[in-house]
Every structure is written in structure tokens, then in C-alpha cells.
Image: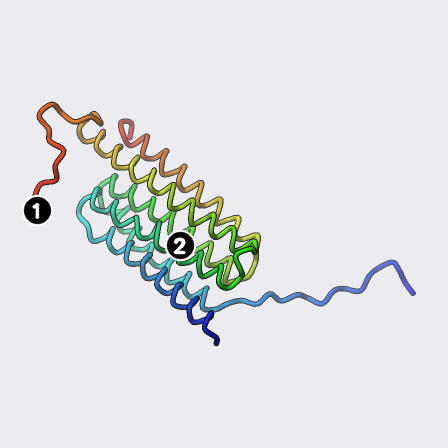
Amino acid sequence: MNVADVVVAVLVTVAVLVGVLSCIGVLMTRNAYDALHYTAPASVVSPVLLAVAVVIEEGIGSQAGIKSIIVALLLIVLNTVLVHATARAGRIRDKGRWALEPNEKATIPDR
Amino acid sequence: MSVLAPPLAAEVVLPVSTGWLIAGAVLLAGCFPLLWVCLRRSILEALVAVELAGTITTLVLLIIAQGTHRQPFFDLALVSAVLSFGGGLAFARFLERWV
């Protein structure tokens, strides 16, 4: 087992841990808006780590390396849009409109 | 010398990386908490869980493709990344008013 194999093993392990912890985070929260935050690590950190691991194993010019990079970029960009769309849908469902109410302040209350 | 039937090529056995497949199995197990959220929580939290499950599934497909060293399987991960986004967006849109 050479250095590259060790690095790949570490990257894959961390990526899997981040993904599993994100899932547990969604389970532990009691609010959909809080749960949305836990989708970010699984959509940003894990794909990047896995793509780096594939690139180290196969090379950056390989078909596998290029496709894994594309998948990582897609997940990063598309998840951002999806999280916003979900939060927007939740607010419209709750309040009936997206815009702020006349007497509503866009501040986060202390918890 | 017969030219009718070429000799059968020896069966090619592609190497399988067990470590990658174990990682994929562990990551896939993360979908069980999401299934619980879908069954027991509000519909908005269920949507969040479905979206995260789509991401996890895409990552598992990526891991399986690398673990089995089959290049075409990477296309499945690509398609899953795009379609899970489209599905989540459609759910979110309908969730605004109609569901």
C-alpha cells in the first residue's frame, strides 16, 4: 500500500462520514429550515473529496476523473438552487407569499 | 485453418475494490434516517430528506462505478445528479400551494 492508496482511503472515509453525519443531522433537527443546512456538507464536501480520490486513483485526464469532477460540480451548483427553492416553497406554504410582511423584520431571533 | 469462428476470448475479470464498495454500503445506510424522516415528520422535512437522499444516491453510484472500475457506470451518477435536482425542484414547486 503506497502513499496514494492511504490518501484515497482517508478521503473516501471522510467523505462517507460527512455524508452519514449529514443524514443523522437531518434526523436530529426539529425544523425543516434547520434541516436544510445539513444537506450542504453532503452536497459540497463529500463530492469534492470523492472526486479528488477518483482523480488520484485514475488520473485527472481519465474518463472517470473527468466525470467525477463534473458530478461534484453539478451537486455543488444544483444543490444550492434546490435548497433555496425548498426554503422558498416552505415559506410560501406557511405565509402564503414570499415577500416580507409589512411589519415583519428579516432578523433571526435569539434562541 | 478455419476462419468461420474466432476462438472465444478469455473472460475478462475486472478488478473490484472492496474498500470502495464497503464505503458505498456505509453511505447507503445513511438513507435509513432519511427514510424515518420521510415517514414520521412534516411534508417539508420529508422533502429535505428526499433531496438529501438523492445526493447520497448519486454519491453511492459514483462509489460503485469506481469500486467496480466500470467507466459507463459514471454516467449513472451524472444522470442521477441532474434528475434528483429536477425531481426536488418539481416537488418544491408543487409543495408551495397544491400539495
Closest to the camera, between mark 1 and mark 2, is: 2
Q: Residue at x 38, y 41 (%)?
A: A78
A52 or A43: nearer the eye?
A52
Image coordinates of residue A5 in percent, x first then y, are 46, 70
Mark 1 or 2, nearer chain start: 2
Image coordinates of residue B70 in percent, x first then y, are 57, 58
A89 or A14: nearer the eye?
A14
Q: Quadrant of the C terminus of chain B?
A: top left
Q: Quadrant of the N terminus of chain B?
A: bottom right
Q: Kindly identify the amino acid type of the residue bearing the numbered disc 1.
A: Arg
B96 or A10: nearer the eye?
A10
Q: Residue at x 25, y 39 (%)?
A: B44
Query: Residue under circle 1?
Result: A111
Q: Residues within 10 Å of mark 1 (few under 14, many from 20)?
A: few
Q: Residue at x 17, y 28 (%)?
A: A95
Name the chain under label 1. Answer: A
Q: Are marks 1 and 2 in contact (CB under 8 Å)?
A: no
Q: Residue at x 22, y 27 (%)?
A: A98
Q: Residues within 10 Å of mark 2 (few under 14, many from 20)?
A: many
Above or below, B9 relative to B85: below
Above or below, B51 relative to A88: below
> SS of the residue at dot 2?
helix
Image coordinates of residue B28 in percent, x first then y, are 38, 57
> SS of the residue at dot 1?
loop
Query: Residue under circle 2?
Result: A48
Image coordinates of residue B81 in percent, x first then y, are 43, 45
Structure colour scheme: rainbow
